[in-house]
Each structure stands twice: as C-alpha cells, then as structure tokens.
Image: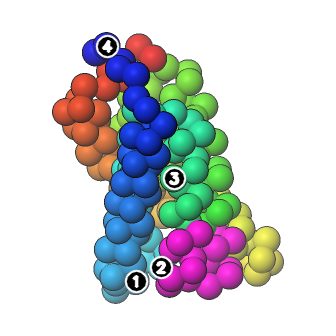
Amino acid sequence: MKKEKTSAAEKIALLGLLTALCFGLSYIEFLIPFSALGIPGIKLGLANICVTAALYAIGTKEAAAINLIRIILSWLIFGSFTGLIYSLAGSALSFAGSVALKKSARFSPIGVSAAAGALHNIGQLAAAMILTDASALMYYIPVLIICGLFAGAINGFIVSAILSRVGVNYKGE
C-alpha cells in the first residue's frame, strides 16, 4: 500500500482516537472480575491491541505515547500507586520486547503480541517481588507466562486482522 502524507492534525487526531480506544478497553477490562477465575492478576490485555496495532501502523514513539498516556489515565481514574508501578514495569518490559521482536522481522503481530503478554506479566511479577520482597512469587511465573502467551496470542490475531483490514503490510518488515 502506498503511504499517503498525513497532516499533523490528522496524526494528532488518530493518536487521540487510539488513546481513547485504548483507555476504553482498559475500562472494560477493569469491569471484568478476573479474580473470580481463581488466578489473581490475570487480565486480557485488551488495550495492548491498540498499542501493538499502533506500533505496526504508526510507529514506535507514537505507540509508546499511547501506552504511557493510557497507563497514567487508568491510574488516575481507577488505580493505586502500587498499581501504577506494576503497570509501568509490565508495560516497559512488554513494549521493549515488542519493539525488539518487530524489528527482528521474524515474528508476526501474533508472535509479538504473545511475547508481549508474557513479558508484561513477568515485568509486573518482578515489580511485585521487589516491592514486597516476596520471592515465593517465583512459583507463579509459569501460570503468568502461559496466561500471558494465550491472551497475547488472541490479541495478536485481532491486531493482524485490523492491520490487514486497514492495509498495513507487516510481513517482511
């Protein structure tokens, strides 16, 4: 697909729209009682659909900005300070891994998103271990990795479908 020149106003509007969508998905996820499943801390990571799609369709800096703004907004509306720390730790590791895997050009958005889900959980668990000095949390890593890979892969399928629909070619990048 030939890339058309977009104005600054169009780019700002797109970033605002994706940030709002990202925040809306975070809110929907906030309303779902995942702890009822018996696995504390597990979420679908729906907001990462927007972040991963932005990473492929717009760029690294823009996707990082969307992610950071969404984290801050979510913290201000329904979070705690420790929740902010966990979210920042998970997102930083997840986003760094996503960027590295995308640049390697060996992974589709499905693989990138699956790895991001697992890395997000590992980053949050690492933050929890540092903040609480609870090394017993190490035994929770396999559960978090499996859940992160599964949720991330589902989100990656959605991202791939979105990218195909809007004409973004991610193969061979």
Q: Cα distance, mark 3 to mark 1?
A: 27 Å
Instruction: Work out which residue is located at the far left of the displayed protein and give it.
Output: 165
Q: How is the image coloured?
A: rainbow
The question of residue 85 being in magenta is answered with yes
In terms of secondary structure, where does tag 2 sit?
A: loop
The earlier-in-sequence mark between 3 and 1 is 1
The quadrant in which the C terminus is found is top left
- Asked if the residue at tag 2 contacts the one at tag 4, i.e. Cβ–Cβ closer than 8 Å, the answer is no
Quarter-wise, where is residue 156 in the image? top left
Q: Which residue is denoted by mark 3 in the rendering?
A: 66
In terms of secondary structure, where does tag 1 sit?
A: helix
The residues colored magenta run: 72-86
Q: Amino acid at mark 1?
A: Ser
Q: Which residue is denoted by mark 1 in the rendering?
A: 35
Which label lies toward us, 4 or 2?
4
The question of residue 82 being in magenta is answered with yes
In terms of secondary structure, where does tag 4 sit?
A: loop
The earlier-in-sequence mark between 2 and 3 is 2
Where residue 154 appears, as percent x and y from the top left, is 29, 49
Residue 2, disc: 4
Where residue 132 appears, as percent x and y from the top left, is 76, 81
Q: Which residue is denoted by mark 2 in the rendering?
A: 40
Q: Amino acid at mark 3?
A: Ile
Q: Residue at x 68, y 82 (%)?
A: 81
Which label lies toward us, 2 or 3?
3
Crowd around label 4: few <14 · some 14–19 · many ≥20 (10 Å): few
Q: Amino acid at mark 4?
A: Lys
The prevailing secondary structure element of the residues shown in magenta is helix
